[in-house]
Amino acid sequence: MASYEPVIGLEVHVELASKSKIFCPSTTAFGGDPNTHVCPVCLGLPGVLPVLNKQVVEFGIRAALALNCEIAHFCKFDRKNYYYPDLPKNYQISQYDLPLAFNGYILIEGENGPKKIGITRVHMEEDAGKLVHQGTISTTPYSLVDYNRTGVPLLEIVSEPDISSVEEAKSYLNKLKAIIQYTGVSDCKMEEGSLRCDANVSVRPVGSDRLGTKTEIKNMNSFRALQKALSYEIERQIEVLESGGEIVQETRTWDEGKGITLPMRSKEEAHDYRYFPEPDLVPLVISSSWVDSIRKSLPELPDERKERYVKEFDLPPYDAGVLTSSREVADYFEACVDLYPYPKVVSNWIMGDLARLLNAHNVEIENCPVKPRQLVAMLKLIDKNVISGKIGKTVLEEMFATGKDPDVIVEEKGLRQITDEGSIEPIIDQVIADNPKSVNDYRNGKEKALGFLVGQVMKATKGKANPAIVNQLLRKKLN
Amino acid sequence: MLLTIADVEHVALLSRLELTPEEKEMYRRQLAKILDYAAKLQELDTENIPPTAHVVPLQNVFREDEVGEHLPPEKVLANAPDREDNFFKVPRIL
């Protein structure tokens, strides 16, 4: 098994965030009742003329520049012909031989340091409609078609086959998503289909420079699905080769329920798309001044922001990488640091307890019930010894659940830290009286026993006693 | 130009057309004639001529990103071969 290595290339589609569709004024809003976001153009009625949305081109150039691409001076649209009911015109308007941009790359954290993953091309196209089946496609008696999504602008981003592990594929997609989100041209929500990913996968003996026969994997609707589908497909191909078989070049679909990839039933010759230049749209000539003005408007991108965090906030590169991997998280972090100049403390809380709460409740940080101002207020309570760090976690959970300010919670729940020695002493005396064995152990040199006794005091005070004071008083009494 | 029945069947399949043997033979002959006619273009020397992307000498025709009127569902579905609620209803296609 160890003698094979995978070769992976990813094709990613992102929905661009223009208000209207790529070739007509219908809305791109997600959802909506079936077939209400349509007009004669996106329905492909006879005699209509598509006209290119300028915003889509600008978004496309913006994303392509952020992906380090060269922008074409001259590009055009082509018709990709195929018959499927999600496509009312029987062709999709896409770009074939003259795409919007090409020759880009992004940097990912590889197993042996930073690795460049090449981007072959970036092109614009229109999305297709949505088919609704009863159960699965193979058992449904018929299909229902909703054309709301038809004509929503997509950017297709094709990587070079530079990805050599499942981990790298995940890093690539994560990084790509972060970069696109930073540029603001798409929200990249996988669950709403605004980020979709297909993979080309082959395996070859380690050290070989020849590419094996590849398969194309579709229908991976989450990062988890991507990881599982790629792992499965790599194993499957190795097993086929090990047992003397040959890989068949085909398109396979990821079956999430069964956890396997399956060949898609596609008729022979189905992939003859007969591309030709789209006669309804005139070519696009992109001047360098247009490109330059878009380049100047690019925001700080994840790699630059990460570097700044290391320099400006003195954060470990790991923290800087996690915080900047999403624009929203980075914005949240900076809003906190503006109010509270201890970046590492803020980073620990965001990456630790806050991230845990967000994950557990499946909430995005931009909708976090705890605002940066409130998180900072809680941190200040810890600094002022009003609460302990441990109680801080409890307060944060309560803030997350109720959206209340931390000082309100501390008062309401009586969580104020006990720092008054007079109140702590009787409790310590009780704990010493109740635990003669541990007291003896400590006196006989077992340092660990002290930890147990501190724990008992904390328990008796419901975690509210100041641990440093407890420690100090216990030692004084036992020595 | 020599066009085989297999060529006709290929094109017919791509266009989802079902043809009788007689029709296949008829289209084989007719399509061959059309291709012969178009083949005249190949006599031209195009060595130094850039490929034509569009016959109209225009470029960069844009619309602004503004949302306009949608078609009411009754009109959208007026020509639907079959419908269920506001969906188009089609045979399942694998």
Image (cartoon, rainbow, N blue to C red):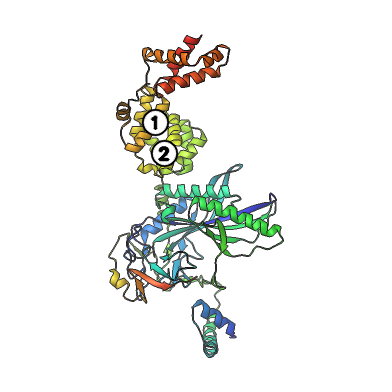
Q: Which mark is residue A357?
A: 2
Q: Is residue A66 above or below residue A46?
A: above
Kind of residue at badge 2: Leu
Q: Residue at left 42%, top 46%?
A: A182
Q: Residue at left 45%, top 30%?
A: A344
Kind of residue at badge 1: Thr
Q: Nearer the viewer, residue A292 or A92?
A: A92
Q: Chain of mark 1?
A: A
For the residue carrying disc 1, how many other residues have a C-alpha within 10 Å: few (<14), some (14-19), or many (20+)? some
Say which residue label 1 marks.
Answer: A394
* Residue A375 locus on image (x, y percent): 36, 32
Tell me: A86 left or right of A271.
left
Please, what secondary structure does the residue beneath circle 1 have?
helix
CB-based contact (under 8 Å), mark 1 and mark 2: no
Res A106 seen here:
no
Of marks 1 and 2, which one's residue comes earlier in the chain? 2
Q: Nearer the viewer, residue A61 or B75?
A: B75
Please, what secondary structure does the residue beneath circle 2 have?
helix
Q: Nearer the viewer, residue A261 or A414?
A: A414
Q: Residue at left 43%, top 42%?
A: A359
Q: Nearer the viewer, residue A339 or B55?
A: A339
* Residue B84 locus on image (x, y percent): 35, 70
Tell me: A469 left or right of A270.
left
Q: Which mark is residue B90?
A: none
Res A282 seen here:
yes
Tell me: B33 left or right of A372.
right
Q: Quadrant of residue A56?
A: bottom left
Mark 1 to mark 2: distance in Å?
11 Å
Q: Residue at left 57%, top 54%?
A: A230
Q: Is residue A385 above or below residue B46?
A: above
* Residue A313 locus on image (x, y percent): 45, 31
